Image (cartoon, rainbow, N blue to C red):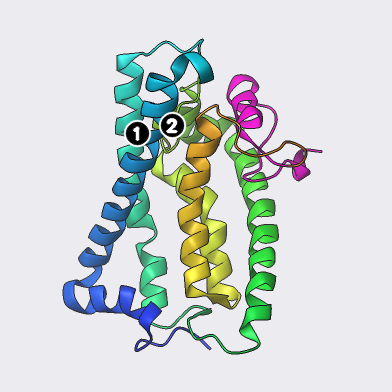
Amino acid sequence: DTLGRGEPGAMIYAWVYESYGAGGLFLITISFGLVLYVVLSWSSYAVFFVWRRERFVPDYRPDGREMRRSTLWSLYSVAGNALLVLPVQLLIVAGNSRVYYDFDAGDWYYVPISFVGAMVVSETMIYWIHRALHTKFLYRHLHIHHHRFRVPTPLSCMAFHPLDSFAQSFPYHLYALFVPVNFWLYLAMVAFVSVWSVMIHDRVRWVPGGIVNHTGCHTAHHWYFNCNYGQYFTLWDR
């Protein structure tokens, strides 16, 4: 079953759309993205790169010009992604996706299964999309804007060309269009990408190594360009 317009989850999109149209959906999305960026990125920067810099990143030296550039590129990316994801939101509002809201007794078993499925699909697709973004044409026109920030900081965690960052989030939307997925799980997966982006750019290791593409792995990616293309894991790099 798709997400019914009268269900609470659908009302987030449907109410905004019916009250304010597609422009309302765009404004809600861009506002949420900006709040995420300002709260997560600037808080992380303030704590680890200013207040506790000597402990966590003693080699870091602030560069005002780079801070401004990374912030402007991040704002541009947030705005661009709010526009690019709008067709997906309209499909969900119209019931033309596999997103659903209602839980039944069996759904508590299916939600973890659908989450694992989403991780397998997204991790595989994002790895190969990221590899493609490192080919000559796409790197020169899209991905280079992110790699200009050779030293990762939380301020540059969203500093992408909008087409670049949307391409790397698109697998989650594609999954929701073709595979039944709970509405709140879908939103949580999309939102957590922003949290994870801060975590791998703040140069503070939050998770163990092994197969996890932690901040050390992503810092190496910024330095050498030829490794660690996955989002959450390094399995495809092995």
Q: What element carries label 2?
A: helix
**Which residue in the protein does label 1 denote?**
42
* Residue at x-position 44% and y-position 29%: 145
Q: How many marks?
A: 2
Task: From this view, report whether residue 66 is shown above or below residue 29.
Answer: above
Residue 108 placement: quadrant: bottom right
Check the image and name the residue furthest to the left: 20
Residue 21 belongs to magenta span: no
How far separated are the C-alphas under marks 1 and 2? 7 Å
In this view of the protein, which residue sits in the foreground, 222 or 94? 222
* Residue at x-position 53% and y-position 75%: 182
Q: In which quarter of the image is the C terminus?
A: top right
The spot of residue 50 in percent (x, y) is: 38, 20
Residue 234 belongs to magenta span: yes
In this view of the protein, which residue sits in the foreground, 168 or 235? 235
Q: Is residue 41 left or right of residue 117?
A: left
The spot of residue 106 in percent (x, y) is: 66, 87
The spot of residue 24 in percent (x, y) is: 21, 66
The spot of residue 212 in percent (x, y) is: 70, 41
**Badge 1 vs badge 2, beta-carbon distance below 8 Å:** yes
Task: From this view, report whether residue 124 is shown above or below residue 115.
Answer: above
**Residue flagged by tag 2: what amino acid is it?**
Pro
Q: Which region shows up in magenta?
A: 212-238
**Which residue in the protein does label 2 denote?**
154
**Residue flagged by tag 1: what amino acid is it?**
Trp
Could you tell me if residue 79 is visible in this image?
Answer: no
Q: Which badge, 1 or 2, comes first in the chain's sequence?
A: 1
Residue 110 placement: quadrant: bottom right
Q: Is mark 1 on a helix, strand or loop?
A: helix
In this view of the protein, which residue sits in the foreground, 115 or 163? 115
Q: Is residue 234 left or right of residue 38?
A: right
In this view of the protein, which residue sits in the foreground, 220 or 148? 220
